[in-house]
Image: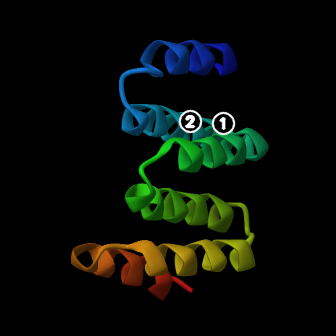
Amino acid sequence: MEDLVAEGVEYICSKSSDLISKLYLEAAQYQERKENISLARKYLSLATKASNKAHNWKIWIIGARIEARIGSQKSSKSLIEKALFEIPQKKESIGFIEYAKY
């Protein structure tokens, strides 16, 4: 999977940073489902580096869900709080719903 992601990133590297970010985000979610949390975290980190900073809040929320799933409530809550500072006003309800889980 790691090689496939690298090849995909190389292919679309000149196309769009949003596409690269989405690819890393999908890879992170895939690795989370396979319970490979360290690799999921790596891909989330790469997604934040590749994304438009205005979209990082989505990555923080997905990261928070992964952390909550593995029982790391403190990290999860921290990521949700980070998302709430960056989330657009029109999308605040999403952040508050996630935050209410804690």
Q: Vertical placement of 1 versus 82: above or below? A: above
> Residue 38, position in %: x, y?
78, 44
Q: List the single residue furthest toward the front.
A: 14
The mark total stands at 2
Q: Is the C-beta separation of discs 1 and 2 under 8 Å? A: yes
The answer to which quarter of the image holds residue 84 is bottom left
Q: Residue at x 57, y 12 (%)?
A: 7
**Image quarter hosting the C terminus:** bottom right
Q: Is residue 48 left or right of residue 69?
A: left
Q: Secondary structure at mark 2?
A: helix
The residue to which callout 2 is attached is: 30
**Residue 36 vs residue 27, the one in the foreground:** 27
Q: Amino acid at mark 1?
A: Lys
Q: Residue at x 71, y 73 (%)?
A: 75
Q: Residue at x 61, y 47 (%)?
A: 44
**Image quarter hosting the N terminus:** top right
